[in-house]
Image (cartoon, helix red, strand yellow):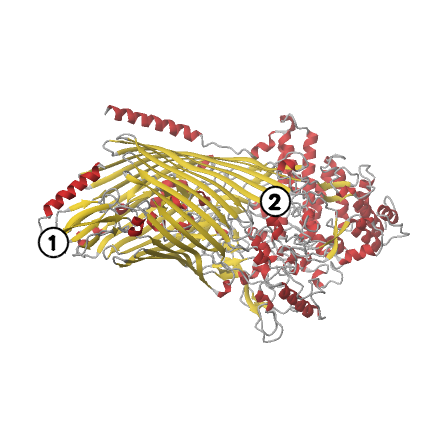
């Protein structure tokens, strides 16, 4: 009996010991993520949260797919299939359930949410409380978040709403989100604002950013980048004075200059050509948020196999446009002959050359576009800001190894614009805003104003937001 | 030897006494068990007398009896056999068959065991006898078709693929719907730590236990059985017990060697190169209105050759399997040693598996109150992986898609580039390396202290599950310019302790009770590093260190801990009235501080009617019982930190060399345990001399506070949030019937049959759930949609009608049921369900003299599958029309009256024909001859002639998936596929490789 008593007490002791020690051990914290509430505890972590917005901007659904789609929906790329979701878009049969546009929508609002987190919460942080944060830095961080939010809102409204020209901007645009999610979903079921309202919101973000951003901010957003985007927005709205003015400001800022050649496409982040780009590196390329794997688009789609998929070669129309004037370095130096995914011999762009690491940069804003905007705005607005359209265009032609033109008209500027900016995601909007069919000889489905030259509001938004309105047409 | 001598003396004495009677004679012989092993200690009595004897260690006996008397052979747990003694008899050898109705048997249950007769939990038991002659690759296949309520779908024919295991349907809608698997008391981890290769099924966690080492499997189904596993019991629990030695048994050695040949079951017919050329030319001619030749389309001339990719990715896989089991025991110590080696070649090129395993199970009785032991299994495995599906490295997907006119080799036989993103799959497989090496240790060590005349038992277990994974990828220059190397190391370490104290007692003879108190603590840590590098000078430089641009893709650790206290009390009166209750309190590091602990309980009652005189008077039932249980279980499978608001770091947050963080998970501090409440009622019967057993159960399982990564409104900036989103109900019936149809000395035929029906319904979803156009709350997916008030799994698609024979247009139905040629996403309706109306299995076992034959059939009725890959394999325009298609596409509409598969090339619907619709939804009802085995055991006389060294020789042949009965529309498609273990995507497949049909020949020697 003695042994049993001993055994009993030992068991009880052991039991109590184990019970007590085990409960404490249930406190386990993540080792590779940080809790939300630690983000605003130091200047370094706040900077990290701003860096995170740029990182989100690398996503192939924000920098890659929208540009690819804009090229093949228009006349620059003859798309050779691959994903059914891209094919639907190519054939102007996009449905609301289309996975590609769904990802664009979701990733865009992810970025906007990350930006809103800074824009909404950082003003409440007292810079005096944090040793490594100054008021100027605080303002700059907010400005950077506003700039990136503007870039994405602009991209969304261009894809999911008819352009300004459709009804002077009174048609529906996209929902404007200004808050950061904390658990209550009601501020995130907004109705769509009109295109004018969205444009005004973007403009306000950019004007605020111009005021708070430095002129030189490395690869991060600068005041010049905000001015450049504002110039583009104004041109899309046919506000020629503003467009010419801001483009001119950027050209004359001294921060940027036309590069001598086209090397800036190849992993060159410091070229004077570049106003704002998305920097992709081998170790840090485009990634999908959900499963944290590469969702790179530029290198993959714009290059022939085996480095790429061979999906997005030059269209015959673009080849013809270059062939019409021989010796264009933008073709000779920026294309390669190869067969596409369908086995047809054609040409591919070399603007995204890093097939080894899938890490070429995305051209968001470069100085060339400012010359093109200034030329177009001066011409169409009857203005004479900075320099003449002919001089601006000849500057670009000379770099391309082409002779001067004596005079330019809108067609000449548009052609230059096409040859300069092809494969960079401008073509669809350039055609639509100029009231031109997306496809040469295209039918009513690809005509400006047609239901499916824009995307439907995605199914995820429709089913989770009772206040949303779908675009006209059958989706 | 002492004992043997004693019996010889006794026999002599008996002989001496009985020799005085006239026609008496001595009968000798051997008693063996079902497996042909000698059975020591079997008793032999002369019916109607007091004479009797027992067999010796070698199963031999000798007894004296008169002609006309009957000898009765019996052994606990085995069926008793009577043999009469006639004038010519001198030798009677008998083989005692296992008694399936031996209700005295002890069954392994959660944290203990229980006499089968007294079980009032709903458990399905698969015993050693039922599986010992089944030759399978992994343990999940042992369960297939064997018991009601357990549905197993092999995901694909790719080696090492996980099977989808569902115990009583889908009880949860997050990805954690697989049951908890416990091997000898160690709950094993089934996290998938490897890179996905298309689909979402991962590596099979059950490939780490050698099926030949398994003694029995118990599937715990109702809350009465599973609530003792608390927060992890909701999806059912599968207890695997490995083989143990037996005390005082001669050491037996079993050597099993077999060879297997496998091929694919069924593949679709796709176009040959010339069919492809002709089709494209004909279509182009009609589309453009001008005669077009294949050459015009760049497809080469008819007859200019091509490649049969589908044939090229298949082969006859030849596999070897060696298995050694050594089992024995002395007075105090028992042991089992298992060794196995497998060299498996899949029927898909590049898919090989090499596996070596060892097991040692040891137990020793130290003294009269202390027992100690250890169960330890080691597995070392090397798998050459191929893509499973929907992946350009998946041989089957790529072989389906690749245009047959694209050459794979040049004239010298060198690989050539395909020119498109669909790669030269032969070059991928031949030149790239994709190797997964795993080493896994699962085991425990225990002590058991018994006190108070063995009424009180304290069992103390320490267990470990350590998994090491090394995945090496090396893509050659030809396939990836610059080359690519990738190396992933994962270590998943789990250690745990179970401390249980059991007190069992009987008072006033009839009142039996037991109390169990227990503690369970588990710590799991998963560490991963994933590095890659590019820029290799030549393919000869194999490892990541040689690449010029190294990248760290992942480097992280996931800790989690679980701590449970539990108790179970049982009471019965004369084994007639039984009551049982259990409770468990679980704490998990996965849950927020507000809801860290969960309580789970169950109560069960049983009434053994066959103990009642009024039933006994009927003289019909050998056993009859009613049983019912109610209780709760939980589910904690929702990631490691589901309740916290988190910002992610690493490349996902970094930019241009600056480190950053990005919102990754929205906070939900109120996240609660998902809880399932189960009601279970059942009847167990046994009649006609226990030759017929029939069990029925009904269950109703309500899961509340369903855990789900709920889709948030996109404007929130978060994809989803972990939330408790609603309630789900599963109801169903389970039927198990087993019969001994014929039983004579030389011939026996047994049948067991089971059938399960399960209905599931979403009872309620949260108010802020997404809604459909009718305002019903839904959980939306690309192909399936869960709808409040209806099933969790509904295929939600546009309805396809067919090609109008007059117009040549493809036609669909709009949401109102009217014909349309331009359907939209608003026209989607519920078109089918991946859940079967009923499913189950049937086994027939026939034994004739030394031959045995068994056939296992499994079936599923009323379920659909959506083969998403048909959007590519049908129609003309998929992927820009560059891919191959199925042969039925040759039947396109040409003129009015045509009954065509494909619309007219000039129709506006020609290119929209293959859009997602129920055209890709197929009826997947099937009946499959899963396993057929024919065996022959050499008779004792032959063995004797071999000198008595060998105690048994068995030759056998097994065919797997020999025959499948399915709908015509499933021609070329395996009905038993799924590409995702997530219940919301059940029954969806892209181009999942079919299951293998295999033929296996082997021999088993017993020494």
Q: Chain of mark 1?
A: B
Mark 1 crowd level (few <14, some 14–19, many ≥20, 10 Å Cα) = few
Name the secondary structure under disc 2.
loop
Residue B911 visible: no
| Residue found farthest to the bottom | B897
Whether residue A287 is situated above or below residue B868 in the rendered picture: above
Residue under the point 58% across and 76% down: B897
Residue under the point 58% across and 54% down: A459
Judge left or right: residue A333 versus residue B673: right
Whether residue B472 is situated above or below residue B835 in the rendered picture: above
- Residue A385 tag number: none
* CB atoms of marks 1 and 2 within 8 Å: no
Q: CA distance from mark 1 to mark 2?
A: 91 Å
**Horizontal and vertical percent position of residue B589:** 46, 35
Q: Quadrant of residue B930?
A: bottom left
Judge left or right: residue B508 versus residue A62: left
**Horizontal and vertical percent position of residue A45:** 62, 31
Mark 1 or 2: in front is 1
Residue under the point 60% across and 49% down: B430
Q: Which residue is mark 1?
A: B23
**Horizontal and vertical percent position of residue A77:** 73, 55
Q: Quadrant of residue B368?
A: top left
Q: Which residue is mark 2?
A: A288
Task: Return the residue nearer the eye: B456 or A66.
Answer: B456
Q: State which quarter of the image contains the N terminus of chain A.
A: top left
Task: Return the residue nearer the eye: B346 or A440.
Answer: B346
**Horizontal and vertical percent position of residue B203:** 50, 45
Judge left or right: residue A313 versus residue B215: right
Name the secondary structure under disc 1.
loop
Mark 2 crowd level (few <14, some 14–19, many ≥20, 10 Å Cα) = some
Residue A22 visible: yes
Q: Chain of mark 2?
A: A
């Amino acid at each position: 009996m003695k042994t049993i008593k001993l055994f009993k007490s030992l068991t009880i002791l052991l039991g109590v010991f184990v019970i007590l020690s085990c409960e404490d051990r249930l406190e386990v914290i993540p080792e590779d993520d940080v809790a939300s509430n630690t983000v605003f505890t130091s200047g370094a972590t706040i900077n990290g949260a701003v860096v995170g917005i740029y990182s989100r901007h690398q996503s192939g659904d924000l920098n890659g797919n929208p540009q690819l789609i804009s090229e093949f929906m228009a006349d620059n790329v003859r798309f050779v299939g691959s994903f059914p979701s891209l094919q639907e878009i190519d054939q102007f049969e996009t449905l609301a359930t289309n996975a590609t546009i769904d990802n664009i929508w979701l990733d865009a609002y992810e970025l906007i949410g990350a930006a809103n987190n800074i824009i909404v919460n950082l003003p409440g942080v007292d810079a005096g409380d944090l040793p490594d944060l100054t008021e100027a830095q605080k303002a700059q961080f907010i400005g950077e978040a506003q700039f990136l939010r503007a870039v994405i809102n602009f991209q969304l409204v261009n894809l999911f709403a008819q352009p300004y020209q459709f009804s002077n901007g009174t048609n529906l645009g996209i929902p404007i989100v200004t808050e950061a999610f904390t658990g209550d979903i009601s501020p995130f079921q907004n109705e769509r604002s009109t295109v004018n309202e969205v444009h005004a919101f973007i403009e306000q973000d950019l004007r605020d950013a111009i005021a708070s951003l430095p002129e030189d901010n490395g690869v991060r957003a600068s005041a010049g980048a905000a001015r450049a985007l504002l110039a583009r927005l104004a041109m899309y709205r046919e506000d020629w004075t503003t467009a010419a003015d801001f483009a001119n400001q950027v050209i004359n800022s001294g921060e940027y200059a036309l590069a001598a050649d086209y090397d800036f496409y190849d992993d060159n982040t410091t070229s004077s050509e570049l106003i704002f780009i998305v920097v992709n590196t081998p170790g840090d390329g485009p990634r999908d948020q959900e499963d944290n794997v590469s969702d790179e688009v530029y290198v993959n789609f714009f290059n022939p196999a085996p480095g790429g998929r061979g999906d997005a070669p030059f269209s015959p129309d673009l080849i013809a446009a270059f062939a019409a004037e021989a010796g264009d370095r933008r073709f000779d130096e920026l294309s390669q002959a190869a067969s596409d995914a369908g086995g047809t011999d054609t040409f591919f762009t070399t603007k995204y050359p890093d097939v080894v690491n899938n890490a070429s940069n995305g051209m968001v804003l470069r100085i060339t576009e400012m010359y093109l905007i200034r030329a177009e705005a001066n011409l169409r607005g009857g203005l004479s800001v900075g320099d003449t359209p002919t001089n601006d265009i000849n500057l670009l032609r000379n770099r391309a190894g082409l002779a001067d033109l004596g005079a330019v008209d809108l067609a000449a500027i548009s052609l230059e614009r096409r040859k300069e900016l092809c494969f960079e995601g401008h073509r669809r909007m350039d055609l639509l805003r100029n009231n031109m069919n997306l496809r040469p000889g295209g039918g009513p489905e690809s005509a400006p104003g047609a239901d499916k030259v824009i995307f439907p509001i995605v199914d995820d938004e429709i089913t989770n937001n009772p206040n949303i309105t779908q675009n006209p047409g059958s989706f | 030897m002492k004992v043997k001598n004693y019996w010889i003396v006794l026999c002599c004495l008996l002989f001496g006494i009985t020799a005085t009677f006239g026609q008496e004679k001595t009968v000798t012989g051997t008693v063996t068990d079902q497996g042909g092993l000698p059975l020591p200690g079997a008793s032999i009595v002369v019916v109607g007398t007091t004479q009797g004897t027992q067999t010796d260690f070698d199963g031999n006996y000798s007894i004296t009896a008169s002609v006309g008397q009957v000898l009765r052979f019996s052994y606990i747990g085995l069926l008793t056999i009577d043999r009469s003694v006639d004038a010519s008899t001198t030798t009677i050898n008998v083989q005692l068959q296992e008694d399936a109705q031996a209700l005295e048997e002890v069954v392994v249950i959660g944290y203990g065991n229980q006499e089968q007769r007294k079980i009032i939990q709903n458990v399905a038991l698969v015993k050693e006898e039922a599986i010992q002659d089944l030759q399978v690759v992994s343990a999940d296949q042992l369960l297939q078709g064997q018991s009601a309520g357990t549905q197993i779908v092999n995901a694909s024919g790719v080696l090492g693929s996980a099977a989808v295991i569902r115990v009583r349907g889908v009880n949860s809608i997050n990805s954690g719907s697989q049951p908890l698997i416990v091997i000898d008391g160690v709950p094993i981890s089934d996290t998938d730590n490897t890179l996905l290769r298309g689909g979402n099924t991962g590596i099979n966690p059950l490939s780490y236990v050698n099926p030949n080492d398994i003694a029995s499997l118990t599937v715990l189904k109702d809350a009465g059985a599973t609530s003792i596993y608390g927060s992890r019991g909701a999806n059912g629990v599968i207890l695997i017990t490995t083989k143990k030695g037996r005390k005082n048994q001669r050491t037996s050695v079993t050597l099993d060697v077999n060879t297997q040949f496998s091929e694919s079951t069924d593949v679709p017919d796709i176009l040959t190169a010339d069919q492809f050329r002709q089709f494209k030319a004909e279509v182009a001619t009609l589309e453009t209105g001008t005669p077009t030749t294949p050459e015009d389309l760049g497809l080469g001339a008819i007859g200019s050759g091509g490649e049969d990719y589908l044939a090229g990715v298949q082969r006859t896989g030849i596999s070897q399997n060696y298995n050694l089991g050594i089992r024995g025991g002395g007075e105090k110590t028992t042991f089992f040693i298992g060794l196995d080696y497998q060299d498996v070649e899949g029927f898909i090129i590049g898919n090989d598996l090499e596996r070596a395993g060892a097991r040692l199970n040891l137990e020793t009785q130290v003294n009269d109150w202390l027992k100690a032991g250890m169960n330890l299994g080691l597995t070392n495995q090397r798998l050459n992986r191929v893509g499973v599906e929907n992946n350009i490295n998946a041989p089957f997907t790529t072989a389906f898609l690749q245009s047959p006119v694209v050459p794979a080799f040049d004239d010298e036989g060198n690989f050539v580039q395909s020119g498109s993103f669909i790669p030269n799959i032969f070059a991928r497989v031949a030149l790239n390396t994709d190797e997964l090496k795993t080493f896994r240790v699962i085991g425990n060590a225990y002590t058991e202290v018994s006190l108070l005349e063995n009424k009180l038992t304290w069992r103390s277990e320490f267990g470990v599950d350590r998994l090491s994974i090394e995945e090496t990828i090396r893509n050659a220059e030809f396939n990836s310019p610059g080359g690519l190397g990738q190396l992933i190391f994962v270590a998943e370490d789990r250690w745990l302790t179970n401390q249980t104290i059991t007190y069992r007692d009987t008072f006033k003879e009839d009142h039996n009770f037991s109390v169990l108190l227990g503690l369970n603590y588990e710590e799991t840590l998963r560490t991963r590093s994933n590095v890659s590098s590019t820029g290799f000078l030549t393919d000869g430089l194999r490892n990541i260190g040689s690449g010029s641009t190294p990248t760290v893709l992942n480097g992280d650790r996931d800790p989690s801990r679980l701590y449970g206290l539990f108790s179970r009390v049982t009471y019965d009166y004369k084994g007639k009235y039984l009551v049982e209750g259990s409770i468990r309190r679980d704490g998990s590091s996965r849950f927020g501080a507000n809801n860290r602990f969960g309580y789970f309980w169950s109560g069960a009652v049983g009434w053994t009617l066959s103990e009642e005189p009024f039933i006994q008077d009927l003289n019909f039932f050998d056993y009859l019982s009613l049983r019912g249980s109610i209780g709760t279980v939980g589910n904690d499978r929702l990631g490691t930190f589901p309740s916290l608001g988190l910002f992610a770091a690493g490349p996902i947050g970094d930019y241009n060399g600056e480190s950053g963080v990005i919102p990754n998970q929205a906070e939900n501090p109120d996240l609660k345990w998902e809880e399932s409440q189960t009601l279970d009622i059942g009847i167990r019967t046994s009649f006609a001399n226990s030759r017929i057993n029939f069990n029925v159960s009904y269950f109703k399982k309500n899961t509340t506070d369903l855990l789900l990564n709920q889709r948030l409104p996109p404007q929130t900036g978060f994809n989803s949030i972990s939330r408790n989103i609603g309630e789900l109900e599963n109801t169903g019936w389970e039927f198990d019937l087993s019969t001994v149809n014929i039983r004579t000395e030389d011939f026996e035929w047994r049948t067991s049959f089971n059938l399960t029906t399960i209905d599931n319904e979403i009872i309620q979803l949260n108010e802020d759930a997404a809604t459909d156009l009718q305002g019903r709350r839904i959980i939306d997916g690309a192909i399936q949609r869960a709808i409040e008030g209806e099933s969790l799994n509904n295929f939600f698609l546009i309805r396809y009608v067919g090609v109008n024979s007059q117009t040549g247009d493809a036609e669909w139905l709009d949401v109102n049921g009217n014909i349309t040629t331009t359907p939209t996403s608003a026209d989607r309706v519920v078109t089918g369900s991946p859940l079967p109306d009923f499913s189950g299995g049937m086994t027939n076992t026939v034994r004739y003299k030394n031959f045995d034959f068994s056939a296992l059939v499994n079936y599923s009725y009323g379920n659909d599958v959506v083969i998403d890959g048909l959007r590519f394999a049908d129609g003309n325009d998929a992927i820009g029309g560059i891919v191959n298609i199925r042969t039925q596409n040759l039947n396109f509409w040409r003129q009015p009256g045509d009954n065509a598969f494909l619309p007219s090339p000039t129709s506006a619907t020609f290119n929209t024909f293959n859009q997602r619709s129920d055209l890709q939804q197929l009826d997947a009802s099937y009946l499959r001859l899963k396993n057929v085995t024919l065996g022959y055991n050499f008779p004792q006389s032959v063995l004797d002639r071999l000198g008595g060294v060998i105690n048994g020789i068995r030759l056998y042949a097994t065919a797997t998936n020999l025959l499948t009965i399915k709908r015509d529309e499933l021609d070329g498609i395996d009905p038993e596929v799924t590409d995702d273990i997530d219940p919301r995507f059940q029954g969806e497949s892209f181009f999942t490789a079919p299951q293998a049909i295999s033929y296996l020949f082997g021999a088993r020697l017993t020494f």
